[in-house]
Image (cartoon, coloured by chain):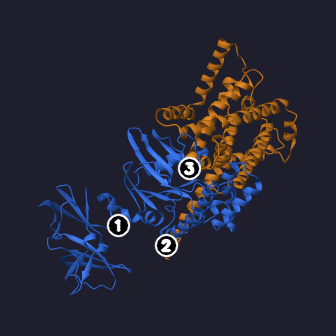
Chain colours: A blue, B orange
Amino acid sequence: MGADPATFLRIEGITRRFGQVAAVDAVDLDVARGETLCLLGPSGCGKSTLLRTIAGLEAPDSGRILIDGEDVTTLPPHRRPMNMMFQSYALFPHMSVRRNIAFGLERQRLARAAIAERVDEMLALASLEALADRRPHQLSGGQRQRLALARALARHPRVLLLDEPLAALDRQLRERTRTELAAILERVGVTCVLVTHDQEEALTLADRIAVMRQGRVAQIGTPSEIYDEPADRAVAELFGTLNLFQATARNGGLHCASLGLSLPAGTGQADAATVAIRPERLRILDGDEHCDHEVQARVLRNEFLGASRLLLLRLPDGATMRLLTDPRTRGEPGTDVRVGFDADAVRVLTQ
Amino acid sequence: MTVRGIRARGLARFGFVTAVCFGYAFLYVPIVLLVFYSFNDSRLVTVWGGFSTRWYVALFENETLLRAALRSLQVAVVSASLATMVGLAAGLALVRLSGIRRALLLACFGSLLVMPDVLIGLSMLLLFVNLDQWVGWSGRGLTTVALAHLTFASAYVAVVVRARLLQADASIEEAARDLGARPGQAFWLVTVPLIRPALISGWLLAFTLSLDDLVVASFVSGPGSSTLPMVIYSSVRLGVTPEVNALATLLILAVTLGIISAALINRFFIRSDP
């Protein structure tokens, strides 16, 4: 990683051990000014520990954290130019909405009028004007979430840290709040590091995603890069259902028996690999339609999902695969269909 | 519903109400009797001789009893306040330490909770006698009683504070730090208000334990520093005078008012409790 001038927040070789286990293991990350970077991974992958280390709530065993070229690694949390939104929101229960937002501004010893003005701005941003004198326990889940965000943004943080910002909300509310959150982040334009285990959140909110596994970054890229070109099988499996087939080396290339598919040399270096196709990249072909690759299959199940239809298919060699398609598609169980897919739908993954 | 069903339910309800009545009676009849007999005109404690407030008048002329009551209140306020501070520190340490250090501290404070009063009193007495020999400090009197009370009461406060801290969200103090509060500010502006109910009830607990203690005080008090329980106990051995009832009634009144006001304060400050 060179000295990219766009880099605003730089994480250099951060390691944090708990006993013998490295929760974060020599992680390097660069975040550009105004960018939203999402740390995605299952629980225990070290993403929250990394976020807490950036905030200064955990001390790294080694490595450096730089903001705009300035080393903040040894600064205590209250002197770092960033603020965090906690997963539990961590609102102050004994203070009103207004006092919660004002807390960080009061610590900066701003003039009273300046504090009041900024608090009003934040109340408007979070649509909480009418609830300014309530206590946190008198707010709904969505209102608390917005209060936590407003409190974290009040001090004009140079980097905003979000720890699972939507995890505490129920499913229905989550989608709407996610849209609101994306809109607020865009309006404020703050550099943002977001931690989540939810791939939809990552795909919709992030400019770039860093997939973490066992304390390391497994892959980093834009949402579409990560989704379409996963580095390995584990990354691919993070995002939805995937059809996986064994492939073996043959004639310098790879051969996948289930799909009757031969891939040229250079697509896989190993003796054996996994071939992956996403269910939405498969199509059922009508009489005269043709595709790069075609395969015969028998419909086992046909599930109507409302906005789409999921077909469970059996291939000639007995392997099964899933196909996600238009809800109007026919395909009665027991009938044979011709399934086609484009060459760029096929991904060869290492284990 | 069948007649038998209704009867069975009625019986169950009757049984439940009876049990509740007995329970409350067991708790409160002695206290009601005590209050009742404090207004007894007769010199004999158990024989009703008509309504009178003469024992209240006599009480305010009984200097021994009043002095002892004042002494006990003094000791209780001082030891409860100090015990709240020590208990707060210990409670925080119990939550923040880990491994062997927490285990040791927990054992230290836990053992104080289960140690018989006689042993606490005896060991404290030995300590004070030794201090006298080593450094020539012989302050036996109210100071030593307060110190002894501080010792065991702080363990109770620590337990209450720890429970409250465990129940609270640890990231709230982190949020304060993240929002620019220095460690001290985060503690006083956020953590202390958060555990205020525990501090209030811990103080009340320590206060009551001190006011109530006969055994430990008997070991460590010095000449001329008998606490109220000691004076009452020694006077009962010579026969109870109704003045003690009057005093007890006043104490019950004070404690009741204290508990009610503590509850109101709690309610007012921490309306946010789930």
Say which quarter of the image contains residue B272: bottom right
Amino acid type at circle 3 is Ser
Q: Is residue B70 shown above or below A328? A: above
Closer to the camera: disc 2 or disc 1?
A: 1
The chain carrying label 1 is A
Number of residues whose C-alpha sits closer than 10 Å to that of mark 1, classed few (under 14), some (14–19) or many (20 or more) = few
Q: Give me the C-alpha separation between circle 1 and circle 3.
A: 32 Å
Q: Is residue B107 left or right of residue B59?
A: left
Number of residues whose C-alpha sits closer than 10 Å to that of mark 3, classed few (under 14), some (14–19) or many (20 or more) = some
Q: Is residue A213 left or right of residue A143?
A: left
Number of residues whose C-alpha sits closer than 10 Å to that of mark 2, classed few (under 14), some (14–19) or many (20 or more) = few
User: In the depicted view, which residue is nearer to us: B226 or A318?
Assistant: A318
Q: Which residue is mark 2?
A: B4
- Mark closer to the chain start, 2 or 3: 2
* The C terminus of chain B - image quarter: bottom right
The image position of residue B103, as x and y in percent, is 49, 34
The image position of residue A237, as x and y in percent, is 32, 62
Amino acid type at circle 2 is Arg
Q: Are marks 1 and 3 on the same chain?
A: no
